[in-house]
Every structure is written in structure tokens, then in C-alpha cells.
């Protein structure tokens, strides 16, 4: 049986996509579960810092505030992806309330981004 390079590349790509998601959905120890949830929240906080940094650079340079849409869309996409992942994670020793709190937090942040970031959308009459 001959395996082509294209077949190997596809297998590698699928492994990179499927295995991490599969690992998150598998049973974990309580500490691993906690660390996974905390990593998700920390990563979201870093996206907020990236938005703030982008705003600062735009404010002092180009004044093209519509460019902030890139950062906002990253945040929205991240929340959608991680909420799906959290929902797929199995309960670990009664962790459902902790998982639900993380999900609710991310959903709250996603919804409130529109309200909190909307004044910046109107600067210079740019909408993003």
C-alpha cells in the first residue's frame, strides 16, 4: 500500500484539529479540569489585552478605529469556540456548576462586548 504525501498531510492536519478537541472532552482529574477552564478564561483575558493594545496604537497613529473589528471578531470567535468545547467536556466530580459559570461568563462577555465597545465604533463615524 502506497501512501501519498497529500494523504500524510491531510492526516497530520486532522490529527492537529481533532486530537486536542478530543483530549478536552475526555475524562480528566479535577485539577486538570480546573486548569483547562482557567486556561480558557486566561486566554480570553489576553484577547481583551490585545484589543486594548490595538486601540492604543490606533489612537496614537492611524485613527482608523474600524480596524478594531479584527480584535473584536477574534474575541467573539474565541468565545463561540470555547463555549462549544466547554459544553462538550464531561463532568468531573460535580464540576457542572463550575463549567456552567465559565460558560455564562464567556457568553456575558460576548454579549457585553457589543455594548462596551460600541462607543469606539462611532469614533470618526467608522462602523465595524
Image (cartoon, rainbow, N blue to C red):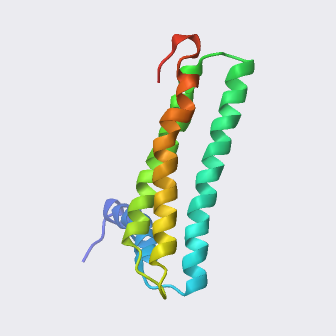
Q: Is residue 12 visible?
A: no
Q: Please say if 5 is above or below 25.
A: above
Counting labels gives 0
Q: Is residue 12 left or right of residue 4?
A: right
- Left or right, residue 1 beside residue 5: left
Q: Is residue 69 above or below residue 14?
A: above
| Residue 56, position as x, y percentages in the image | 72, 28
Which residue occupies 56% across, 62% down? Answer: 40
Q: Position of residue 87 (x, y in %)?
A: 38, 68
Q: Residue at x 47, y 85 (%)?
A: 94
10 left or right of 73 in image? left
Residue 80 in the image: above or below residue 13: above
Residue closest to the eye, 42 or 107: 107
Farthest residue toward the left? 1
Q: Nearer the viewer, residue 23 or 75?
A: 75
Q: Is residue 17 visible?
A: yes
- Residue most extreme to the right: 60
Q: Which residue is drawn at the image coordinates 44% and 77% (left, top)?
A: 96
Q: Residue 109: x percent and y percent?
A: 52, 48
Image coordinates for residue 113, horizontal then vertical, percent: 52, 39
Residue for point 66% across, 29% down: 55
Quadrant location of the N terminus?
bottom left
Q: Front-most of 118 and 60? A: 118
Amino acid at each position: 500500500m502506497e501512501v501519498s504525501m497529500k494523504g500524510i498531510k491531510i492526516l497530520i492536519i486532522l490529527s492537529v484539529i481533532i486530537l486536542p478537541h478530543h483530549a478536552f472532552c475526555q475524562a480528566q482529574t479535577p485539577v486538570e479540569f480546573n486548569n483547562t477552564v482557567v486556561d480558557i478564561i486566561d486566554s480570553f483575558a489576553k484577547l481583551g489585552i490585545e484589543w486594548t493594545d490595538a486601540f492604543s496604537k490606533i489612537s496614537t497613529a492611524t485613527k482608523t478605529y474600524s480596524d478594531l473589528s479584527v480584535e473584536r471578531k477574534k474575541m467573539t470567535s474565541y468565545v463561540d469556540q470555547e463555549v462549544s468545547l466547554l459544553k462538550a467536556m464531561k463532568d468531573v466530580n460535580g464540576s457542572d456548576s463550575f463549567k456552567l459559570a465559565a460558560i455564562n461568563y464567556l457568553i456575558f462577555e460576548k454579549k457585553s462586548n457589543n455594548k462596551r465597545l460600541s462607543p469606539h465604533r462611532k469614533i470618526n463615524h467608522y462602523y465595524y
